[in-house]
Image (cartoon, rainbow, N blue to C red):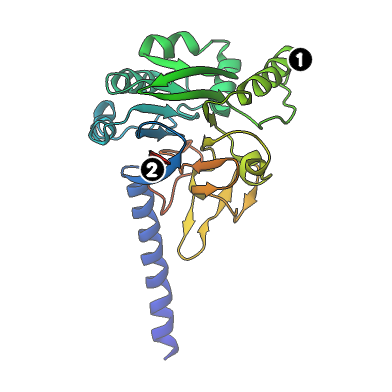
Amino acid sequence: MKKRTWIWIPAALLALTLLCLLSVFLSARIFTVTKYRIYAPLEQPMRLVQLSDLHNSEFGEDNARLVKRIRALKPDLILMTGDMINNDDPDISVLLELTQSLSGIAPVYCCYGNHEMAWMELFDTDLRPSLEQAGATVLDAEYCDLDWNGNALRLGGYEGYYRAPVMTSHGDREKEKREFEFFQEFEHTDRYKILLNHIPTAWLDWEYRDDYNVDLVFSGHYHGGQIRLPLIGGLFAPNIGYFPHYTKGLYASIPAKVVLSAGLGSNRKIPRINNPGEIVCVDLIPEK
């Protein structure tokens, strides 16, 4: 009996190892589409598609599979919520080629993530000109007012911890001042307010969604918990730690609703396991 037990233990470990390797392989090559319906004080329905945390990943040559699927969704706006590149990779052609392809489908708006911010500091290069040339509108502690088919929208973008003091490594007081000015101006409007905010910590773990006058927030950063365990969920989230309460989904509150994407890729250090990439598709439905 003991001999049989010793035979099954290494066999089970081998099977588990192969299963993990298969999951890593598939999680890096496939993606899902998650759809939400949100009722909003708008005149006409509209569809928003969110991409986040690509980390220079490719799904097919030149991300052809990704572009094809987004085109089939027929979005009215495409939102990119940061970490689309890796902070130490000088080659950003994957992002720029994808942006150019997507801009032929619908208007593209993007905010920076922590990887874009670190990349610009490391390589002393501004990403904005390249992204704008590829067809995106960059929102870096900025907003724009849109009138889309009768819908009055205010669309803003920001990387970090909404309203929390954020200092760069050089103690950039001008940056901090600009961010606080953005917050104050962004909220004061009767338009429907959509915020691209890469790091969701303030909205979810600090429960800012109960306190600030924003209607809809799109975030990423947590990678769906990176490694998803059956019946448990995500294993780890940056800034939060192990077994985070929030990893992906739609979290409704008053006044804000938060859409947290699991993202599409991962940096080179930690693979995604049991965690395929995600495209988020949100249909805004007029309340009336």
Q: Residue 38 at what x, y percent from top left?
A: 43, 43
Tag shown at residue 181 = none
Would you identify the image quadrant in which residue 203 lies? top right
Residue at image x 41%, y 54%?
Answer: 274
What amino acid is labelled 2 in the image?
Glu
Q: Can residue 111 be seen?
A: no
Query: In the depicted view, which residue is nearer to us: 103 or 224?
Result: 103
Q: Secondary structure at mark 1?
A: helix
Residue type, mark 1 in image: Arg
Q: Quadrant of residue 19?
A: bottom left
Can residue 40 be seen here? The reply is yes
Residue at 41% from the left image edge and 50% from the top image edge = 275
Residue sitting at x 59%, y 33%: 214
Residue 173 tag number: 1
Check the image and name the residue furthest to the bottom. Answer: 1
Q: Quadrant of the N terminus?
A: bottom left
Instruction: Please tell me whether residue 152 is drawn above or below residue 285 in the rendered image.
Output: above
Q: Of the residues under marks 2 and 1, which one precedes in the sequence?
A: 1
**Crowd band around label 1 with a 10 angstrom C-alpha radius: few (<14), some (14–19), many (20+):** few
Q: Is residue 96 left or right of residue 195?
A: left
Residue 101 in the figure: left or right of residue 170: left
Q: How dense is the environment of label 2, judged by Cα within 10 Å: few (below 14), some, or many (20 and up)?
A: many
Q: Residue at x 38, y 23 (%)?
A: 150
The residue where tag 2 is placed is 278
